[in-house]
Amino acid sequence: MKKFINKPEDLTKELLEGLVMANEDIIELVDGNLVVNKKLKDADRVTVVTLGGTGHEPALQGFVGEGMVDIAVCGDIFAAPGPESCMKALEMADKGKGVLFVVLNHAGDMLTANLTMKAAKAKNINVVKVVTQEDVTTAPREDADNRRGFVGCVPLYKIAGGAALQGKSLDEIAAIAQKFADNMAAISVSLTGATHPVTGGNLAVLNDDEMGVGMGQHGEGGGYKIPMKSSAETVALLMDELLKDLDVKKGEKLMCVVNGCGATTLMEQLITYRDSVNFLNDKGIKVVANIVGEVLTVQETGGYQLFIARMDDELLSYWKELANTPYYKS
């Protein structure tokens, strides 16, 4: 493993310090590895808090700022933070209108989130938890509680943040976020695995002539390996799974996200997006919102996550609200 780092035990501290130094007008770092929206102190609205391990840059802390996340509680590399830091974040974020707590469905994150919710209830903090769980290869839709959370958390931040800017109540925003979460689906495809930047261990092993479908966020398995295919063939394979999962019909409107996982070139991502739009157009399905780029990475993993979500005019109005974060602006 070759990486430009200092001491492995200082990775999280140093990457967060660097993020804040590069974006001092937008965010600040608070003890407990909390990345905080600098305008939070003046927020007269519902606020948004999320949690997760570092090592997935720019997610999750790169989307802190006006119109998206107000506080990201950051754990160590690929590890959930503790409930104490999350409680501190909820108390900081509560400006009298309530807090939306967005959690990706991974074991450590959910354990911390559930302990945090119990503590928040004891302190009468007005908070609602929404879980993202869109990986179609982990479990069937009727067993969504066992589905992993992927890149879908990021567009959900944007939609929830936009609704908050429009003055919606916590109950309204929670319903909007849940509606979006219930109508999204994602699948991953891998060409190469990553190395853990602390241990140097390989997270997944693939031969040069094969690709892994549905292998998860960190190459943790659950999918299958098949011979390498072209971009258009791969998109057709993946998109068929997504459309089937959501039961998407001709005439519907979708968001489409191509999320590079760390080592996939922008060239490949753009070709993949082109093939995705063409595939959907051929089925009479219109793409009305998108992200193409590295959003939630896994170090130098080669591959991408393909994500779709149902959209309507209401969701689009929140999506189009202004946002100012280090890695997403609108």
Image (tube, rainbow, N blue to C red):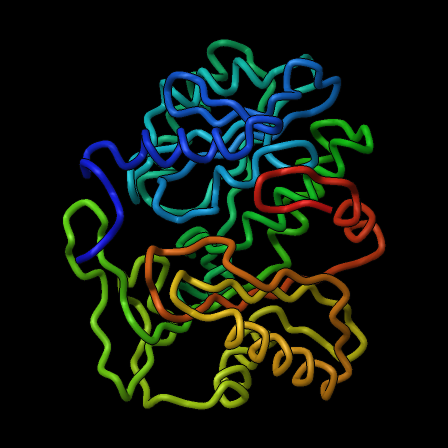
Q: Percent from the top left, x then y, of residue 168? A: 79, 31
Relative side of 162 to 269, left or right? right
313 relative to 25, above or below:
below
**Residue at (55% x, 11% y) in the render:** 124
105 or 201, which lies in front?
Answer: 201
Image quarter where the N terminus lies is: bottom left
**Residue at (61% x, 54% y) in the render:** 182
Relative side of 229 to 158, left or right? left
**Residue at (61% x, 83% y) in the render:** 275
**Residue at (70% x, 28% y) in the render:** 170
Q: Residue furthest top?
A: 123
Q: Percent from the top left, x then y, of residue 306? A: 53, 69
Relative side of 187 to 279, left or right? left
Relative side of 217 to 65, left or right? left
Q: Percent from the top left, x then y, of residue 297? A: 41, 55
Location of residue 310 by image quarter: bottom right
